[in-house]
Amino acid sequence: MAYSIVLVFQDWDLLTPARFVGLANLERLRLDPKVLVSLWNTAYLTFVGVPLQLLLALALALALNVKLRGIAGYRTVFYLPSITPAVASAVVWLQILHPEFGILNNFLEQFGISRVNWLFDTRAAKPALIFMSLWGVGGAMVIFLAGLQGIPEELYEAAVLDGAGWWSKFIRVTMPLLSPFLFFQMIMGVINGFQANFTTTYIMTGGGPQDATLVTVLYIYRNGFEYFKMGYAASLAWMLFWIIMFFTLIQFLFANRWVYYEVGQ
């Protein structure tokens, strides 16, 4: 990590000795139009995708937080996709989203919806990647489920005595006690959103079409290991680091306004 700071001020192609270039990499970063494109794509996938993932994970946790025979089996079924290797998931979803023989288009045709060129249309590529990301919400679902099962039943019973319905119990009991888990998931979701789209985009779209899915981590990889511009790649990596730090700190600053922590007696 310390050497990456040194690389920010170097021009190094991995083959010849590094050359000191001062602030040239930072100046190039400021003028490179693909930096803004990659940041926009990353922000889109993160700030649209993460809320949808959290909503779906919470809905699944609420649905599976019941005492039924065989419920553990259902929980396992929904959790398993989250531990599937990213490469294997990408290969499977390539088949699902294929414009000609993909399962998704065949399904949509049953309702009279025209085929969509999911991964090769600039308008559909990012929504398709977000839709695919919902596949792996099992990990978040398990954490929400653990939080739900830690809520004392007495609080719900007291709320019922006060005349609370399902929605009132959810807003006044469930969400406050679940807020630390939601806060943790938001922090991790934003961090992973900025960092974890590399495998998916590299395998499924390569950053295309027309850079519509070129995320920052993929652009860092290309500059470092395809264009052999390690100094510029290090500059991009540090830029991404400070952006992630900024959004993480913002979340911590506002946490005390909505995150509720029980204090032990």
Image (cartoon, grey):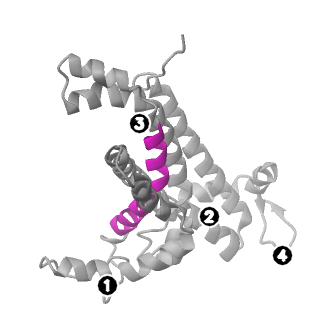
Query: Could you say where residue 260 lies in the image, as x and y percent from the top left?
Result: 44, 23
Q: How far apart are the two marked residues, 3 and 2, measured between alpha carbons?
A: 39 Å
Cβ atoms under marks 4 and 2 closer than 8 Å = no
Q: Earlier in the sequence, mark 4 or mark 2?
A: 4
The residue tagged 3 is 148
Q: Which residue lies furthest to the right in this view?
A: 17
Q: How far apart are the two marked residues, 4 and 1, measured between alpha carbons?
A: 42 Å
Q: Which one is in front, 47 or 219?
A: 47
Left or right: 244 in relation to 204: right
Q: How far apart are the two marked residues, 1 and 3, measured between alpha carbons?
A: 40 Å
Was residue 50 drawn as part of the magenta stretch in this picture? no
Q: What element carries label 1?
A: loop
Query: Could you say where residue 20 lies in the image, as x and y percent from the top left?
Result: 81, 58
Residue 220 badge: 2
Query: Could you say where residue 32 lies in the image, as x and y percent from the top left?
Result: 54, 62
Q: What element carries label 2?
A: helix
Local crowd size for mark 1, using a 10 Å CA cut-off: few (<14), some (14–19), many (≥20): some
Q: What element carries label 4?
A: loop
Cβ atoms under marks 4 and 3 closer than 8 Å = no
The segment highlighted magenta reads 126-146
Local crowd size for mark 3, using a 10 Å CA cut-off: few (<14), some (14–19), many (≥20): some
Cβ atoms under marks 4 and 1 closer than 8 Å = no
The residue tagged 1 is 99
Q: Quadrant of residue 95?
A: bottom left
Which image quarter holds the C terminus? top right
The residue tagged 4 is 15
Which residue is rendered at x = 62% and y = 64% of the image?
Answer: 220
At label 2, the amino acid type is: Ile
